[in-house]
Image (cartoon, helix red, strand yellow):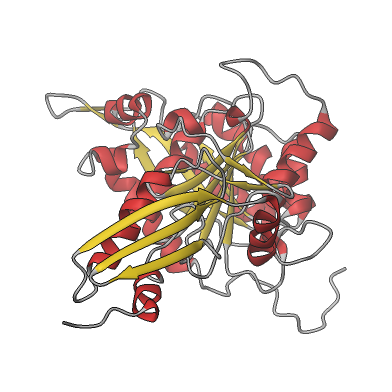
Amino acid sequence: MTKITESAVREALSRVEDPELNRPITDLGMVKSIAINGSNVDVEIYLTIAACPMRNTLLTNTKAAVEEIEGVTNVTATADVMSDDQRRQLRNTLRGTASEPEIPFSKPGSTTRVYAVASGKGGVGKSSVTVNLATALADQGLRVGIIDADIYGHSIPTLMGSDQQPTMMEENLIIPPVSHGVKIISIGHFVQGNAPVVWRGPMLHRAIQQFLTDVFWGDLDILFLDLPPGTGDIAISVAQLVPNAELLVVTTPQHAAAEVAERAGSIAQQTQQRIGGVIENMGTMTLPDGSTIDIFGSGGGQTVADRLSTFTGATVPLMGQIPLDPALRIHGDTGKPVVIAEPDAPAAKVFRDIAQQIIVRRNSIAGKPLNLGVTRK
């Protein structure tokens, strides 16, 4: 009979990742004890908090990993809860020991591409665009997060079908819930029911800052910030806190809406942000008989892209024209974005095309400062 060793068990456990932290439980100090009795193995792991929402997943994955070891016939997996000191140590493992919170995405060496999804006015489908792009990218294997920066009109948890609460740990560390493979955080996670948020500018700034510093995002490839409409306090705060964030401007084909959308894009001139592109939503609708109708007009997206290109002196592409598709609304109401609920729907195909443009461009140096010592006047 093959002798089972503790090192073999630990090696197996190194393949078990905490679903919220995306790191092996062996690296996080979450293995409390290992007991081996012949072919029987008992493993006890630590949970970060007693009400850990991933408890069953962690125990199931732990048991499955150890059962793969040759000679093991029976595995028992149990759980205990970390002490305050252990949670503090975990926080230091994840964040380091810096006394002041830092925004990891604004550091020069950050590999996370940050997109602030903006619009000039409400009702153009900005949040629907955000969740569908995020889930399309996550579905292709990228690590993606969403900050619901629309504090007054938060809707990301509903559109993502998430009722899971963030995990609150020691030392101002928040573990965000995950839905459809995307990490999300919203003020909606912290208010009771559908209660309104009645805050002035400084509190809005502080909320966005906390979402960027106190939430453990891990190593993201893409972070989306779903901005409120217009060019108010939050848009300015995001530009200050994450100056490397690129703007994605969402508009409808209607020229009146396009004119307002230009204002949301033109703020980039003042904040020195790059405009990643324009996305036109609610475009041509195909009727059951095969005919089409432009309910909200046509050409608005291209108009915005052209004018922003003129204002900024750089090419601002029209990244896609999303058709007016009932499937987009239906699946938004059910909390499962159309790109994964109905991938062959007309809107889903356009979202995936836009997501592919983001993937291709994510490592590009186009538009980035090359630090050649040139002073901008």
Image coords of residue 313 (percent x, y) = 66, 61
Q: Foreground residue, 245 or 139?
A: 139
Quarter of the picture holding the N terminus: bottom left
Query: With respect to residue 64, does 282 lie above or below?
Result: above
Q: Foreground residue, 150 or 209?
A: 209
Residue 133 visible, this orientation? no
Quarter of the picture holding the C terminus: bottom right
At 36% across and 52% down in the image, what residue appears?
59
Residue lying at the far left of the rendered structure: 289
Write down the quadrant of residue 6 in the picture.
Answer: bottom left
Query: With respect to residue 153, does 204 lie above or below?
Result: below
Q: Foreground residue, 35 or 129?
A: 35
Q: Foreground residue, 304 or 195?
A: 195
Write down the quadrant of residue 201 in the picture.
Answer: top right
At 31% across and 52% down in the image, what residue appears?
60
At 81% across and 32% down in the image, what residue appears?
203
Image coords of residue 67 (percent x, y) = 23, 65
Q: How many marks?
A: 0
